[in-house]
Amino acid sequence: MSELTEEAIVERLREKFGDRIKAAEITGPRRVFVTVDPPDYKEVVRFIARDLGLVHVQTITGVDYPDEKRMEIMVHMGRRITVTVRTSIPREKPEIDTITDVVPGSSVHEREVHDLLGVVFKGNPNLTRILLPEDWPEGIYPLRKDVPLEEIRAKPLRGEREA
Amino acid sequence: MKRSSYELFFDVPIGPQHPALKEPIFLKLVVEGEQVVKADVDVSYTHRGIEKALEYGNYIQNIYLIERICGICNVAHTLCNVVTVEQLYDKEIPPRAQYIRVIVEELARIHSHLLWLGVAAHEIGFDTWFMYIWRDREVVMDLIEAITGNRVTTAINTIGGVRRDIKPELYDRIRKGMDFLEERTKFYKKVAMEDPTVNARCAGVGILTPKEAVELCAVGPTLRGSGVKHDVRADDPYAAHAEVPFEVVTYDTNDVLARILVRIDEVLESINMVRYCLDHMPEGPYRIKLPLAPPKGEAIGRVEAPRGELIHYVKSNGTEKPERYKVRTPTFSNIPALCAMLTSKGDYIVNIADVPIVFASIDPCLSCTARVEVVDAEKGKRKVLSMEQLRRKGRAW
């Protein structure tokens, strides 16, 4: 869809947002990583989708860094070139704006990250359970690093009968 | 067909048992008479926690676990895994390995698309077609077995190349198989285009407009059936795809028939790609040894699986085990598009009888033991229909 080159994408983003783009690097052919602060996240995603024409949200990845007390949210966008918008949110209060009103198809990806990492996407109208079973204990987010496999195995599920 | 005037809404849950799928789908439909007015999905039924488990295995062990994410597209998953992890090493992979990867990937695509075509034929009650297609699919299964040693779980891709070479004496057998499949697939295309049963059940059913397809992030044949020309093999070439020529197939009727024709044409394209790879197979090693622990870094790998764009993300911390591994399967991305297809709006009406084929049209690996529970909200009565009963209902409609 977009015939923009990797360099042109970085240039357009820097032109529009200036210092608000904290870092922008081209890591390889057709791979662009852009780092922004959480307040600018939605605006940058909207600019990429509407103005640069990369409407497709491939997926949203969340990574937990307990040592640095942060979680990283990455939105991978684009059909040909993958532009990744990366932002860090505090681990104690993992909240970020939703982008479902910009790209409706991102709803399932936000629900997945919410389910597995406990990130709250403010404004998502349907932030319900999508991947974990119905009887999964509340408040355990399996992809967080402080939840070891042994603990997940030991937790009785809500629907489990008492032996 | 007119809109229903019952004004009485029922919940019809469909699912959730789909063992062949990473995300088995539970469809919650709201119906008015025979017409679906709202669709929602729940994919929470066999979440296996593979992403978490991958953080506990090393990169070689993980190949075997990733292979088991999906039985049918196991080649796409291992291929995506190795192209992602190889980006961390920044080493040249031998060209022969890349060609072998493309051959096995395209053979797997042929087998997956033929499997799906058979399932689609079964869903519309055309079981003769289904049996013919599955008989012919055995040819490609035998070829995969001859090349990799296994019919289904191929275990061919590994970090640094492939695990087995294709012996030159197999070339002729593969070519013969391709000739046979080409002839049969062309015949199936004729059937799909001319047969009144296929036309009656598939044309105008499961509409997904190009605008919806793009906004709802549809991928693969679902996207291309709506006339949007995107294919990872062409857009973001991996393995030897930058060298192997092919056409991105699109149809613009936006319905189930378009998705059938896209997949049939893709089988024909794959056959030509296999032939090209055999004719231009480079000499040399088929594998290089790489250290078990890749350097620190992160990488995104994209592969066109039979069902669409597949994405793996890896974050390496310099040890033998990944810090984070993320998998996004094509079916997951097609869920919003599926909900749009299953919702009646304006002149577009979705009947309950069309739900199985519309659902199947995104290719969610329907080896399902799904059942349908019809709940009468007014009287509180419940009756449970099996998928077979639903199919019969579909044929009678």
Image (cartoon, coloured by chain):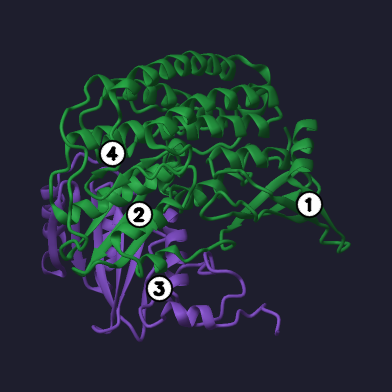
Checking the image for residue A1, the label placed there is: 4
> What's the amino acid at mark 2?
Ile
Cα–Cα gap, marks 1 and 2: 52 Å
Residue B26, position in %: x, y? 63, 56
Chain A's colour is: purple
Q: Are marks 1 and 3 in contact (CB under 8 Å)?
A: no
Q: Are marks 4 and 3 in contact (CB under 8 Å)?
A: no
Q: Which chain is green?
A: B
- The chain that hosts pointer 1 is B
| Marks 4 & 3 on one chain | yes
Q: Residue tagged by mark 2?
A: B63
Quadrant (top left/top right/bottom left/bottom right) for the C terminus of chain B: top right
Mark 1 vs mark 2, foreground winner is 2
Mark 1 vs mark 3, foreground winner is 3
10 Å crowding of disc 3: few (<14), some (14-19), many (20+): many
10 Å crowding of disc 1: few (<14), some (14-19), many (20+): few
